[in-house]
Structure formats: C-alpha cells, structure tokens
C-alpha cells in the first residue's frame, strides 16, 4: 500500500476525531458544514499480461499490456448530527463480486473495527470489459479466465481498500450539492424489441428508448471543490472483445479528463487531488455503440469512440457541476440484507397479473450464450467432447435442468442450472444508501431502464421521496447478471436470457428494495437474511504462472532494442522496444511500467506514465521465456517543446532461485519541437 499523505501523528489524530463523529481541524458542526466529506483514489490494475479479461467471456481475450490503469474512487460522508456514515466506492471494473466485498471488508475491519460494515459500504463497478478477470468465487464468472486469479483479486481488494482508507483519512467538514442534466448522444437502446413490449406508461418516461438522465453530486471541503459523482446509464463497452490492452473504457476516460486534464491531478504524485467518479445506473439495455455494432458509433474506431463517449459524459457532468445546484441536507443512513433470490414469495402487488408469484434458482438461458450482438458475442455453445483446458472447467456445468425449474423459468430455453450448483449466486446482498434526500439502490446486476424505473418507483413510494431522488446503482456489491421486466423477459433477448431468477426477478427486487426503503423511513431494523455459503469450485485455476524469464544472448533486462527517432513534432508517435520480463512478476500497482521523462533544468522529470491516454505499454512473448516491452507515446498537441526520453520499469524471474529482480532501462534522448 502506498504511503499516506500525512504524518502518522496527524493521521492518527484525524482518525480518532472521525471515529468519534467529530469534525477535524477544530471546526464546529453547523448548517454551513452538515457533513464530514472525504475522497480517495487508488490503483486496482491486475496482471497486464496473460490474464483473461472480464466482461465478454472470450477465451481469446487475454491482457497484453496497458492503455490506461484501472482505479478505485471512494467517498466517505459522515452526518455530523448523528455520526452515521456511508462509504461509496466506484471502481473501474466489470463487476463487483462478493469475493471482493468480503476481502475489502476484512481489510477495512482489521484497520477500523466495526466502522465500516456491509450495511454502510457500497461497492460499485463502472462495468468496463477491458480489465483482468478471475476475481469471483463463482465458477461461471471465471470460466473464460481459466479460473480464480488470486493476483487479480488481491490487486482489486487492496486498491479499493486503499481508496476508502484515503477517503477516511481525508474527512473534513464539508457540503454536498446536487444537480441534474440530460445526455442524449452517449447511449442507444440495444434491445429495442424487448423495450417495446413494455406498457405505454413506462415507455413514456423514455421517449427515445434511452435514459438520458445525469445526476451529479458536488463535494466541497470548506470553499474547495474536492470531487464529484456523476451517474449516467450507458454500457462501458466502447472497447471491443478484440482489444487486449487494459482500459477503464469510456467512463474511465471521463474521469481521467476531469481529474488529469482539468484539475491537474497526477496519480503518482503523493498529494490529494480532485476525484471524479462516473458510475453506471440502469444500463442493462444501454449501449455506447451508437450504430448498434461492436466498436461502431460515432466512428468506426473503438479507441476514438471510447474518447468521444467519455468526453460527452465528462462535458455534461462538468456543465451540471458548474450550473444550478441544490444543497444536500438531511440524514445519512443505510440498510442492507441478504435475500435468497431463488425462493422469494412475491406479493401480487408487484406481479404483472396481480397474483402472488415466486422466483426460482438461477438458470442461464440459451440466448445468454449468444451475447449481445451490439456490444460483443459471448461464450460459444456448450458441446460434448470438450478437450483440455476447457473440459475441466466446463464439466461441472454439464447438469440437466430439472423440469420444475424449466417450468418456473418459462419461456426461457434453460440450459445450465448455475444456481443449483453454485456457479452463480442465489443469495445476494441488497442495499439502499441514503445521503440527504438521495437514495441509492444498490443492485447486484445489470438493470434495464424500464426495470430500473419500476425499482425506483417502488423505493420512492416507500421512502416518501420524489422519483428523481432515487437512483439505481448497478453492478453493486455482487453480481447476479440481468434484471429485465417480465414483459422483456418473455421475449428472451440476451438480457432476458441472462435474467437468472425467472420472470418474477424484477417484481421480487421491487418488493425487497421497497422493504429496505421502508426500514430506512421508519428507522426499524430488518433481519440480515440468509448467510451466503461458500460456492464450490472456487479454487480451480488452469492459467499458468511465470516459470522464469530469459533474454537473448548478449543482452540484459531493460536494454533498448529499438530506439526512438532523434526528433518528433507534436502529433507524431515515439516508439521504443525493451528487453523485459513478465508483468506478473510485479504489477507496479500505484506505480508504472512506463515513463516519458522530460529534461528540466538538467534533471529528468516524469512527464507521462502508463496511466495516461497518450501512452501504450504492450507486452509480447518471444519464444518460451523471452519477452519484449513495446512502449509508445502519441505526443499530444499541447506538449511543451524540449528534450525527452522513454523509460521502462520491469522485473525478471530467475529460473534457478525463483527470485524476482527489478530493473530500469532508458532510451537515448530525443527532442519534441
């Protein structure tokens, strides 16, 4: 974990004040600063090579380097009147799994005791499909990654924990304001035929079949802006399943633009900075691929689409941030309980026919395997005679779906009873977090816009607040795939086939989230619900690790094989190739594999790193154990003229002792003019 930003003495003092629910720095609670607010950020980037990527379920999509690093952004809010708090996290990940929630809670509670619990800690993901996978304990989500990748899980849990710790230690008297906007050119409905099956009254909320709403929270400490959370519904899938570089995708780019380009944040510098989170809401049927083809729309270039869709979110968020805002006042509170979604008795108030219904154990439908053709295909069809290495992974799923379960899941073409064998979760965490008037409904899945509307309506009715003050926070705390309306479910598009618990999945969520909202309103406690068990097959891993690193005879690790040119102009790309070791030897989390250094007053200073949009770190295996690092820098138009060089930081593993040794190599200097 990186060093804290304050001395141990001051950190301990601030922590003691915060734990006591008192303001730091001698400030007194009052109307001008009803809350303590803190923000934090850290690196959650996993292995940059030979790790299956999470999201598209493609066996061929394995990491080969880094475009931009993945980060976790955290905000802690403490109600000074009551001492109650919530910690909100949004991370550049595909999903949050319960394995992550448990690991983060274990780390936080070892440090802070019972200050942070399942009830007041909300973990959410942006839903990028361009990051390392293998961090779930449920087998279905590790299949294409070849099993549990502990290095990935640890990187994510450590980084999220660090971001919360940083936000905790940053707590200061502050204010929160709320603004709203509309964004109509960053999403399209990828399942319009299913959307059109919904009643006219529901569709009337979304005239263009998209949810254009953007909600922005602005955080201030005293008179200083310290961060923002900007919710907007669009899939974080501008990068396709052909991409193999780690990327936080369009929402990560939006964060980078606001933090790095507009506020001057340099992530490797040891100082606080502005934190801009861009979480998802009910994005289940919202695609950023405006032409309804993977990597297409507004352009035919997936990287440029990532930038454009990210910039559109950033631009609208900053407009709302700078415009009229309403002061956030009122209590901070939260409720969370586990619900067995395989056996919810649903009241007729929530079903489409007015009669009591039920949910059933999770089943993957045939249409799930087809994937969403607008964003990317999924796993090829199951078949007999699978050979190594897939056979050992797929065999546990070759289970016949019982007839009673097929009947409950009708009209789904049921393929795999993943819930019965623990490959997907049946017991999931449901949570509602309240920050003043704003209610965040933490759903462990992907919610279509009409399904989100109905959940929001149920919560608003129970909480006694306007609909606009209730947001679905998707991809939160665990992952149980999609949530569609019963009408959408009947059509069995990709989203319907991926709605695990049957036709009454959404009605069950409406009912259960309504109960949580009522509990918040009345102050009554709810039972915690069933304790989730440990899924089977959690330890399976068929992905080989690093055996040893080698290099061509007569070379050394870090040696430059291809030098950059002697000079460049802005807009050109500088390239260097190094002899390197495997990136799994050291993830360089909160560090970098790449630096662009500039000569300033006779000293080399860091100008860019592998977290920047302008750089690329590509790793390439050569033969059995040799590898090269290909580092590129697309020189931005605003780059200062001067003298530069490219530096590579890496590590190699000895085949004799297993020892890992770090190295650094640097190119010759070149000019930018």
Image (cartoon, rainbow, N blue to C red):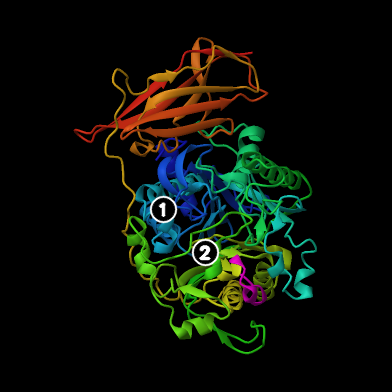
Which residue does the image show at 44% across and 74% down from the upper left? 417
Which residue does the image show at 37% across and 25% down from the upper left? 579
Q: CA distance from mark 2 to mark 1?
A: 16 Å
Depth order, front residue of 368/133: 368
Q: How dense is the environment of label 1, judged by Cα within 10 Å: few (below 14), some, or many (20 and up)?
A: many
Q: In the picture, residue 292 is in which quadrant?
A: bottom right
Question: Badge 1 is on which residue?
Answer: 145
Chain-order first, disc 2 or disc 1: 1
**Number of the label disc, if any, that sits on residue 477:** none
Range of residues picked out in magenta: 484-494
- Measured as percent of width and height from the top left, residue 187 is found at 70, 54
Asked whether 489 falls inside the magenta stretch, the response is yes
- Measured as percent of width and height from the top left, residue 28 is found at 59, 49
Asked whether 119 falls inside the magenta stretch, the response is no
The quarter in which the N terminus is drawn is: top left
Nearer to us: label 2 or label 1: 2
Q: Relative to 360, is 447 above or below?
A: above
Q: Relative to 658, is 331 above or below?
A: below
The quarter in which the C terminus is drawn is: top right
The furthest residue to the front: 385
- Measured as percent of width and height from the top left, residue 654 is found at 24, 32
109 displayed left or right of 164: left
SS majority, magenta:
helix
Q: Is residue 444 visible?
A: no
Badge 1 element: helix
Q: How dense is the environment of label 2, judged by Cα within 10 Å: few (below 14), some, or many (20 and up)?
A: some
4 displayed left or right of 456: left
Q: Relative to 641, is 214 above or below?
A: below
Question: Badge 2 is on which residue?
Answer: 369
- Measured as percent of width and height from the top left, residue 480 is found at 50, 66
Q: Is residue 151 visible?
A: yes
């Amino acid at each position: 974990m990186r060093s804290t930003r304050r001395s141990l003495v001051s950190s301990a003092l601030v922590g003691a004040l915060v734990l006591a629910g008192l303001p730091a720095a001698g400030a007194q609670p009052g109307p001008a600063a009803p809350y303590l607010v803190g923000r934090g950020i850290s690196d959650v980037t996993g292995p940059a090579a030979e790790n299956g990527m999470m999201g598209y379920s493609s066996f061929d999509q394995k990491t080969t380097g880094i475009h931009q690093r993945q980060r976790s952004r955290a905000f802690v809010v403490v109600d000074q009147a009551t001492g109650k708090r919530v910690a909100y996290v949004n991370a550049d990940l595909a999903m949050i799994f319960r394995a992550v929630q448990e690991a983060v809670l274990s780390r936080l509670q070892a440090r802070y005791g019972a200050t942070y619990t399942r009830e007041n800690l909300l973990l959410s993901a942006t839903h990028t499909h361009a990051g390392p996978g293998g961090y779930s304990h449920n087998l279905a989500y590790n299949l294409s990654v070849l099993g549990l990748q502990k290095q990935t899980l640890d990187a994510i849990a450590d980084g999220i924990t660090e971001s919360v710790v940083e936000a905790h230690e940053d707590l200061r008297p502050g204010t929160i304001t709320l603004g709203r906007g509309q964004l109509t050119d960053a999403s399209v409905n990828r399942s319009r035929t299913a959307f059109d099956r919904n009643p006219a009254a529901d569709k009337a909320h979304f005239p263009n079949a998209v949810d254009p709403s953007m909600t922005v929270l602005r955080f201030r400490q005293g008179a200083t802006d310290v961060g923002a959370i900007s919710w907007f519904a669009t899939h974080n899938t501008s990068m396709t399943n052909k991409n193999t570089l780690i990327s936080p995708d369009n929402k990560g780019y939006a964060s980078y633009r606001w933090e790095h380009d507009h506020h001057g944040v340099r992530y490797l510098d040891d100082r606080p900075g502005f934190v801009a989170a861009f979480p998802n809401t009910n994005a289940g049927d919202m695609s950023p691929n405006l032409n309804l083809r993977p990597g297409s729309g507004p352009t035919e270039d997936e990287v440029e689409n990532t930038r454009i869709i990210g910039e559109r979110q950033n631009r609208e968020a900053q407009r709302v941030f700078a415009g009229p805002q309403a002061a956030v006042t009122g209590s901070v509170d939260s409720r969370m309980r586990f619900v067995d979604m395989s056996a919810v008795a649903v009241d007729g108030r929530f079903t489409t026919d007015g009669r009591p219904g039920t949910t059933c154990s999770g089943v993957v439908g045939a249409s799930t395997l087809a994937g969403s053709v607008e964003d990317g295909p999924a796993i090829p069809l199951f078949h007999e005679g699978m050979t190594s290495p897939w056979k050992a992974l797929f065999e546990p799923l070759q289970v016949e779906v019982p007839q009673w379960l097929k009947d409950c899941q009708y009209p789904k073409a049921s393929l795999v009873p993943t819930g019965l064998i623990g490959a997907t979760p049946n017991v999931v965490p449901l949570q509602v977090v309240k920050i003043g008037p704003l209610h965040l409904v933490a759903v462990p899945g992907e919610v279509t816009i009409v399904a989100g509307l109905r959940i929001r309506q149920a919560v608003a009715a129970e909480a006694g607040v306007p609909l606009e003050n209730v947001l679905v926070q998707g991809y939160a705390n665990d992952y149980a795939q999609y949530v569609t309306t019963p009408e959408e479910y009947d059509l069995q598009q990709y989203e319907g086939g991926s709605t695990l618990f049957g036709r009454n999945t959404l009605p069950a969520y409406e009912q259960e989230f309504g109960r949580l909202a009522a509990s918040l309103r009345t102050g009554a406690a709810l039972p915690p619900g069933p304790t989730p068990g440990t899924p089977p097959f959690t330890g399976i891993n068929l992905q080989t690790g690093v055996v040893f690193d080698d290099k061509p005879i007569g070379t050394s690790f870090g040696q430059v094989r291809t030098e950059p040119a002697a000079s460049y102009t802005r807009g050109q790309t500088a390239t260097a190739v190094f002899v390197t070791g495997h990136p799994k030897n050291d993830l360089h989390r909160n560090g970098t594999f790449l630096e662009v250094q500039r000569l300033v007053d006779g000293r080399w200073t860091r100008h860019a790193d592998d977290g920047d949009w302008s750089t690329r770190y590509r790793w390439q295996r050569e033969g059995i154990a040799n590898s090269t690092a290909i580092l590129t820098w697309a020189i931005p138009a605003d780059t200062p003229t001067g003298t530069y060089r490219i530096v590579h930081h890496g590590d190699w593993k000895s085949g004799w002792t297993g020892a890992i040794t770090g190295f650094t190599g640097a190119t010759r200097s070149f000019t930018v003019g």
